[in-house]
Amino acid sequence: MEDKTAPAVPALVTEMVQPTPSGVAKLLAAWDGLSVETQILILVRFEDLQTPPHLLHRLHVRALDSDNAYIRYLAARKIKFRQSCTGEDQALKEKIENDPDPLVRFSLLEDPSTLSIMYDEAFKDADSFFALPQAARLAKIRLIAGGGEWIAALISEALGKQLKNGTVSELELYEILADYLTKPSFRERYTDTEATYDGYNEYSKGTDIESLWKLVPQLPGSLSTLLIEHLPEASGLIREIPKDVIDDLTDTQLEILLSRKDIELRELRKKLFWAAGITRERLRSAAVRVNFQIDNEDFASILAKSPKERVNILEDLAMMASDLRLCVFDAIHDALFASDVSPLGGDYEYAMFAREKLKKRLAELKGWERDRELLDLRLYRLAHRAMPWDSKKEGSAPTDTLGFLADEIIAGDTWATFMAFSEAWRRKNEELQREQDPHLLRADLNRCLPRIYEVEHDMSDVDVVTKIDGRLKDIRQAIETTYAEKFGQMLADSEKNILEEHASQLKNQSETLRQAFTALATGQQKQTVLLSIVAGLLVLILLVVLFFLMPLP
């Protein structure tokens, strides 16, 4: 059953907000005494109750008489006109179109029944669109959720014609683009949605955004800035900003673009970091401020520069960069902390900036990326312990479980030692992968690495994994032992049953044989008696014969 609970309105008017004739009658009777906020809430949410259309129409007509222009605008937007326009409908249209406020007057242009801007007469060409008053243009723009390619074409044509002849001003073009780019429906279509299986839709999204990006170099300052601040880097089938657009941007435009957290452009950022000199310092700062990463080899090349140049670059990174890896922030801190280039100790202050950036970055990291960077940080701190930046300090080489790293220490170079440790660690883990319990062995190995004091309860995850792996091993052993015992018992029981069965069979067979032998013996006895009787009879017969054969005296 559908939910028909009343919208969240003040408790005193809950009884009136009911989708019934009496409820609407009460609402209309009290309408003029309700606050503007309550009237807006009712107009926005009353349709949630699935109120019959004729009752909603009464409410909207009544709201058209409000002294508040926004109330009248909401009512005008919600009135449904019949296809066969009656006298009442015509009167309402005239009332709206003659409203003193342009927001209300042009509200009927925001027709949600329009399927596509391709079929809207206002968008058939720039002359038609810019012939409308500015309030009417904005009303049409508020209706559009997509159409980036058409918008780009309209603005491009306006730059070459309507802007020059005074039909439209730069401020009006700014308002049109601002209404288009900043509304939620634009973000929902181009920015906040994932890719779909609708190929044409993805192609259309990509074409729209590409067309808008290509518009940027043509626009004057305020208009180009608006697009640079709001256009997504990727949408649909387009995965990056067109290269020719990037090449045509000024340093000021590039600075605005690279300051956005949602713009990757990692290769461009790296290129500008190395190429932008002192004359483009602001651009270089924008390039490294967000989404800037530096790999181990590039950081090693920074450290290889002259002391003054090296310290200047490290101080810039400590001040400006926010997304470097944890181990890089830590290395910047340690290198600056050990530096004596600045005579008054200014390097120490920049070192503190790097340490604060590390803590902030650590708080932002999640999941597998956090685990990976924490591992690199542990290996770096192990390398720093083995080969300190300060040449006056003596290092402590890894021993015992981590002893395989001791031969990887590179004298006088902390970062090179870290790189060597990282490679040796990778090889060691590949070896462990071939062992019987690789997860347990790796957990034991990880537990020997330095703890990170910036992380509360550090290494507890490793300990948990170790305990789980150990428990699983115990369970496996218990299962194997139990299985062996059970199998042995089953085998013994089976053998016992077989032996008992065989014994029973032998007993039965023995009894059968005994009975057979008994019967045979009885038969033999009977045969012996019979033979004796027969022998006796034969003897008797022989005697009788002999008696008769003997001659008489």
Image: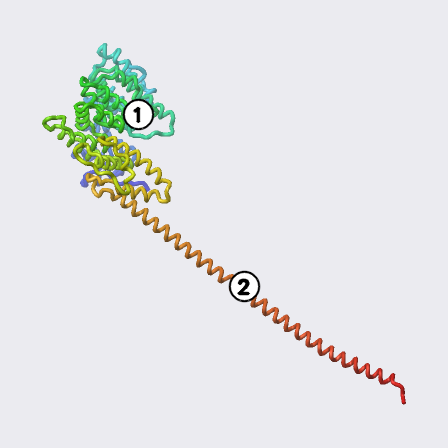
Front residue of 536/494: it is 536
Give x and y (percent) for residue 230. Answer: 24, 24
The spot of residue 508 in percent (x, y) is: 57, 67
Residue 502 tag number: 2
The reply to whether residue 388 is in sight is yes
Q: Which mark is residue 97?
A: none
Q: Position of residue 385 (x, y in %)?
A: 21, 37
Position of residue 469 relative to residue 184, above or below, is below
Identify residue for label 1: 234
Quarter occupied by the C terminus: bottom right
Amino acid type assigned to the residue bearing label 1 in the image: Ala
Q: Is residue 403 above or below residue 257?
A: below
Classify residue 394 by image quadrant: top left
| Percent position of residue 113, x then y | 32, 26
Q: Which of the 4 quarters of the picture holds residue 55?
A: top left
Q: Farthest residue in the top direction? A: 165
Mark 2 / mark 1, whichever is N-terminal: 1
Figure colour scheme:
rainbow
Circle 1: element type:
loop
Q: Is residue 217 above or below residue 353?
A: above
Q: Residues within 10 Å of mark 2 (few under 14, many from 20)?
A: few
Q: Residue at x 29, y 27 (%)?
A: 191
The amino acid sitting under disc 2 is His
Q: Does residue 13 appear anywhere in the picture?
A: no
Residue sitting at the far left: 344
Distance of label 2 from label 1 (alpha carbons): 81 Å
Residue drawn at x 51%, y 64% is 500
